[in-house]
Image (cartoon, rainbow, N blue to C red):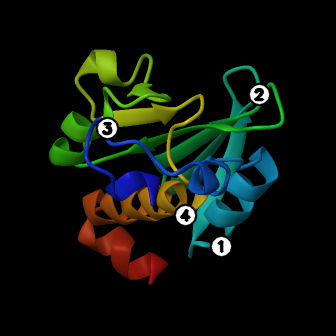
């Protein structure tokens, strides 16, 4: 619901708690692990980096009970999301011209919207792989 409200519109009080993202690092990892042919490494001081065919599609980290999630987006999504509260251009990646967003604080995205962006990021990374690699991964 939070993701379809017009900019500046107030969300009803009963919906605010439901729409707030509470995704944990474990839930983030479960989503990424459920996608076909993924691999993960822990690097950059504890970041959980998820890849498909060697291409990164999502990064998760947690210093609290809520995960900070970084994901690749389309140019249009980047322009829409980069100024939303709780979201920002991904540090380091966006500064190099890449279209990555970081979900770092409330209100951010709902868990279901965040899951969809992770899946979309996975699909974009898969599409960028060489055809031979795509075929090998199925």
Q: Would residue 9 appear left or right of 75 to someone viewing this image?
A: right
Viewer-proximal residue among 103 and 71: 103
- Going from N to C along the chain, the mark reached first, 2 or 3, is 2
Image x and y of residue 8, in percent: 29, 35
Task: Determine which residue is flagged by label 2.
Answer: 46
* Residue picked out by circle 4: 112
- In primary-sequence order, the first of circles 3 and 1 is 1
- Mark 3 touches mark 1? (CB < 8 Å): no
Residue where numbered disc 3 is placed: 81
Closest to the camera, between mark 2 and mark 4, is 4
Q: Quadrant of the C terminus?
A: bottom left
Q: CA distance from mark 4 to mark 3?
A: 15 Å
Among all residues in the image, which is located at the extreme front?
13
- The relative height of residue 60 versus residue 5 in the rendered view (above or below) is above
Q: Quadrant of the N terminus?
A: bottom left
The reply to whether residue 53 is in sight is no
- Label 1 vs label 2: CA separation? 21 Å
Identify the element where label 2 is drawn. loop
Regarding mark 4 in the picture, which secondary structure is present there?
Answer: helix
The tally of labels here is 4
Q: Local crowd at mark 3 within 10 Å, few (<14), some, or many (≥20)?
A: many
Percent across and percent down for residue 137 are 47, 77
- Packing grade of label 2 (10 A; few <14, some 14-19, many >=20) is few
State the mark number for residue 34.
Answer: 1
Judged from the image, the secondary structure of the residue bearing numbered disc 1 is helix
Q: Earlier in the sequence, mark 4 or mark 3?
A: 3
Going from N to C along the chain, the mark reached first, 1 or 2, is 1
């Amino acid at each position: 619901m939070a993701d379809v409200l017009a900019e500046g519109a107030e969300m009803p009080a009963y919906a605010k708690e439901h729409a707030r993202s509470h995704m944990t690092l474990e839930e983030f990892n479960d989503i990424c692990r459920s996608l076909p042919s993924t691999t993960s490494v822990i690097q950059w001081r504890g970041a959980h980096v998820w890849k498909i065919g060697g291409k990164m599609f999502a990064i998760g980290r947690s210093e609290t009970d809520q995960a900070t999630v970084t994901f690749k987006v389309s140019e249009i999504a980047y322009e829409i999301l980069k100024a939303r509260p709780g979201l920002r251009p991904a540090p380091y990646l966006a500064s190099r011209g890449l279209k990555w967003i970081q979900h770092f604080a409330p209100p951010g995205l709902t868990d279901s919207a965040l899951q969809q962006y992770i899946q979309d990021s996975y699909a974009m990374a898969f599409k960028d792989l060489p055809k031979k690699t795509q075929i090998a991964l199925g």
